[in-house]
Amino acid sequence: MTLMVLTSALTVALGAANLVTPGIIMSRTQTQSTKAFFAAEAGAERALWILRKGVFSDSNCNSGANKYIRFNQNQCGSYIQSVYNLSNGAFYYVEYDSGAEITLNSNGVFQDTKRRVELTY
């Protein structure tokens, strides 16, 4: 009788663990995703600020650096901002492309999670 009661209790405990474990994993993934998204958003905001203040200009195709932020030139009119590390362990980098429209792709990374924010104007 005792063996049957213990077997039933073990079955219920293992079933409950199978229900709770995916929720814990999903919660951890959501936390990492949020930090990566906010890092990407921070990169987009900083790049917009730089562009709107006129600190960076792509008018001279040979220049890709300024005193506030460094953009490494890939090809004429296309730049990648240097990686910027944040205090929470996340980092971002921004891809800048000035074709017919200006496009900023801000990429945020936290641990194994990556998120991207794209701005076009």
Image: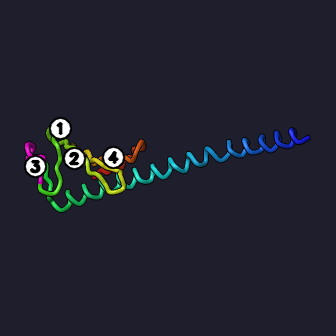
Which labelled disc corresponds to residue 82?
Answer: 2
Helix, strand or loop under label 2? loop
Work out whether residue 47 or residue 9 is closer to the camera in this orientation and state it. 9
Work out whether residue 120 or residue 50 is closer to the camera in this orientation and state it. 50
Q: Which residue is mark 3?
A: 59
C-alpha span from label 2 to label 3: 20 Å
Helix, strand or loop under label 1? strand
Viewer-nearest of discs 2 and 3: 2
> What's under tag 3, amino acid-wise?
Ser
C-alpha span from label 4 to label 3: 24 Å
> Which one is earlier in the sequence, the residue at label 2 or at label 1?
1
Image point (24%, 55%), residue name: 47
Prevalent SS, magenta region: loop
Helix, strand or loop under label 3? loop
User: Residue 92 vs residue 4: left or right?
Assistant: left
> Which one is earlier in the sequence, the residue at label 3 or at label 1?
3
Span colored in magenta: 60-66
Viewer-nearest of discs 2 and 1: 2
> What's under tag 4, amino acid-wise?
Asn
Which labelled disc corresponds to residue 74?
Answer: 1
> What's under tag 2, amino acid-wise?
Ser
> Which one is earlier in the sequence, the residue at label 2 or at label 3?
3
Q: Position of residue 54 (x, y in %)?
A: 15, 59
C-alpha span from label 2 to label 1: 12 Å
Q: Which residue is mark 4?
A: 107
C-alpha span from label 3 to label 1: 15 Å
